[in-house]
Image (spheres, rainbow, N blue to C red):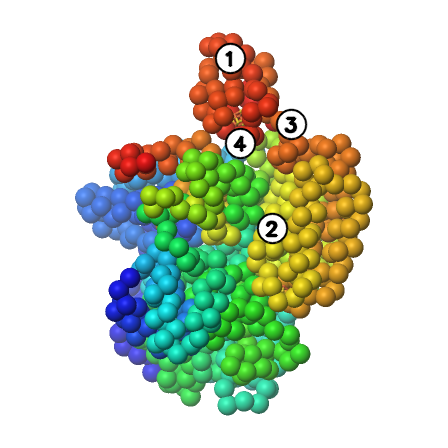
Amino acid sequence: MTRIGKASELAAYRAELLKKRPADAKVVAVCCGTGCNAYGAQKVYAAFAAELAKQGVKDWALRSTGCHGFCERGTLVVMFPEGMLYQRVKPEDVAEIVEKTLKGGETLERFLYDDPVTGEKHRLEHEIPFYKHQERLILGQNGQLNPESIDDYIALGGYLGLAKALEHGADWTLEEVKKANVRGRGGGGFPAGKKWETCRNAKSDKHYVICNADEGDPGAFMDRSVLEGNPHSVIEGMIIGALAIGSDEGFIYVRHEYPLAVKRLEQALVEARGLGLLGEKILGSSLSFDIRINRGGGAFVCGESTALMASIEGRVGEPRAKHINTAIQGLYNKPSNLNNVETWANIPLVINRGAEWYTSIGTKGSTGTKIFSLVGKVNNTGLVEVPMGMTLRKIIFEIGGGIPAGRKFKAVQTGGPSGGCLPAEKLDLPVDFDTLWNEGSMMGSGGMIVMDDRTCMVDVAKYFLGFLKFESCGKCTTCREGIRRLHELVTAVTEGRATEETLQLIEDLSETVEAASLCALGTTATNPVRSTLKFFREEYLAHVKERRCPAAVCKTLIRYDINEKCTGCMVCAKRCPQKCISGERKKLHVIDQSKCIKCGICLDVCKFDAVEVK
Amino acid sequence: MELSRVDAIIERNGSRGASLLAILQDVQDEANYLPREALEHVSKRLELPLARVYAMATFFQAFHLEPRGKYVCTVCMGTACHVRGAARLVEQLERDLEVKSGGTTKDLQFTVEEVNCVGACALGPLVIINGEYHGTMTADRLTKTVEGLKKAEGGTR
Ligand SMILES: Cc1cc2nc3c(=O)[nH]c(=O)nc-3n(C[C@H](O)[C@H](O)[C@H](O)COP(=O)(O)O)c2cc1C
Ligand code: SF4
Ligand code: SF4
């Protein structure tokens, strides 16, 4: 690999690349993101490689890419330049696709996406409602590049932002980021430019630039997909940040649970160094900056800035009081600028296309796009990237395709363990940092978990409290003991052991935990329970007063029964671990309630909808 | 675990306090858990009190102080998996393998674990068995999968 010695030579390097790969080149892109991999994408990719060779196809190139977002329909295969999408492709389908579609130009209808709502078939990726309403500034690149190839990234315009920043200098770069009003995507929404400026102005011989890739939020995988699908976008963002801040050393703190992300990042760093985009005298300029990777140990609290820095220093991840901001005194007590993965990935776009363009997307207070992991009880689960300010309804119903199995929407949870649940009445709210905060929820890092009438909101509150009880670092009494106690109280509700007084106690204690805990884990810990109490009080009362779980989730309060739809197939009786289902072949079966442990297997295995839970 | 292996890991990561987390991660990757001798050796080599090494080893959920089974069954407990019934999968494994979550069967064949979220929410509920993802799992299919593994082991249990 040759080093690129000057910023201006990058364009020439790119021009060479583009000569070899014209824009109308024929490429089959196989999504090898985590979701598709679990469906067997690697085998699909291998099958394409084998078939292209076997059938002697020379005019199609093959590319393995990161996550395209539409995980629900994997394995996804996109054919460029046209952009035709085949979904749910299996290895055994590949020979036919190569022969009929790639060679014969024929469209194989059965692989096209058919809209479950309208029944319409769509050929092109961007026509599918899931994609049509998105604005995929960041995620869109995933489908177009091989994350293990820096040349792919550069061909798409990668590192041009860095070249431009170097050309215009640190001051201009900082101003541009400030003007663009990029707000932190890690949850807090703090303006990145302002943080950069604070860090840069802090007098010190050393400044650090850090990327928060801990993604501890359960139900969120945006950062994972960006790291795995387009690692260079994050690295380029960090180098630009280093220029503006005046830093020579950076860290990426990645979860140990994301081994592929670690591998891709390591490889990307090596390639970037090889081209002279990282290391000493970047692109021949006076900027020297390098990045190291730290693997986190899977503790949620390590996503908190001071805990994360403690962890990089080799100490346990306990937060400290932020009397002095980490931008002024952070890692090893030096000024340290921490931003989230997605925040960093936005920076090259801002520099490349300008603050003015960037602020034209989104809302006035929240510019640009946000990636959400749209999951739970929703038809099109996957990653979606939308301009800030889109309504929850549009995201969940138009992009997400609504609620599966004809059930009813009940709530949407955003902001993870620090966020809240919003009911149907709030569906028309625009999604931006400030609106969600004012409603007692939070944008958070981007988890968006959809819940239907089969989700019990008390159980959800219990779930998050259980999570936080476990994840509290234990430093503050209110957080350590308070969350534990709240978890006990909410558990009592789910087991029908509570009274209305319990609910009052939950509210009172929540106030204390919020007021007296040190870090945001503790101060926001009560958001899930409070927001559900506020919007779904009826459901709590049903548990308390009637000892009933309307969603049929809380084990103590439910029972399984077999209705007259039972055909007497005996499958449930055979699978029941308690052997407590009796009945003869072709006769109605009955559950012995005294022995039933409510495992739900009978419901899972019954093919006739005869098992019901109430 | 051979202490020379621990030495090699320390060399690779640097014999510094800041490398402690990475060293323990690599030790666990090799040994499947953190053996006491390894922790003591790390403490000596890095000149850190054993208490500090131990604090690190018990702070993070990813670390284990007991040997784990040949098959590690990890149930994802992320929110998306939770609303799709992940808790029932844990209970099912506990029943099938007669071991509490976090524990290992006596014959060291199976470990049942929970993880906060692995970021594969579209596949929920999800069980990972030795790194392989099994998506949209049901309690019944899980039982069958585990039975299949037991059989493959020649009915040692
Ligand atoms: C308990 C806790 C967990 C957090 N986890 C994460 C995380 O996983 N990823 C992240 O980017 N930020 C996380 N944050 C927010 C970070 O502390 C920090 O605000 C953020 O990384 C700053 O980057 P940004 O301004 O670009 O968002 C967490 C905060 C708290 C209090
Ligand atoms: S609020 Fe909780 S997590 Fe944060 S420092 Fe206090 S005890 Fe630790
Ligand atoms: S819920 Fe479980 S224990 Fe109860 S009847 Fe059904 S299969 Fe048997």
Q: Which residue is mark 2?
A: A466
Per the rendering, the mark at residue A583 is 1
Query: The numbered mark 2 sits on a residue in which chain?
Result: A
How packed mark 2 is, by other alpha carbons closer than 10 Å (few <14, some 14-19, many 20 or more), is some
Task: Tell whether label 2 touches label 3 (CB within 8 Å).
Answer: no
Q: Earlier in the sequence, mark 3 or mark 4?
A: 4
View quadrant of ligand 2: bottom right
Q: Chain of mark 3?
A: A
Residue that label 4 marks: A599
Inter-mark Cα distance, 1 to 2: 39 Å
The x and y percentages for residue A566 are 54, 15
State the quadrant of the N terminus of chain A.
Answer: bottom left
Q: Amino acid at mark 4?
A: Cys
User: Dot 4: within a 10 Å radius of its alpha carbon, few (fewer than 14), some, or many (20 or more) residues?
Assistant: some
Q: CA distance from mark 3 to mark 4?
A: 14 Å
Q: Amino acid at mark 2?
A: Gly
- Residue B10 position, x and y percent, is 32, 73
Label 2 vs label 4: CA separation? 21 Å
CB under 8 Å between discs 2 and 4: no
Residues at marks 3 and 4 touching, judged by CB atoms closer than 8 Å? no
- Which of the two discs, 3 and 1, labels the residue nearer the N terminus? 1
Q: Nearer the viewer, mark 3 or mark 1?
A: 1
Disc number for residue A614: 3
- SS state under label 2: helix
Q: Residues within 10 Å of mark 1 (few under 14, many from 20)?
A: some
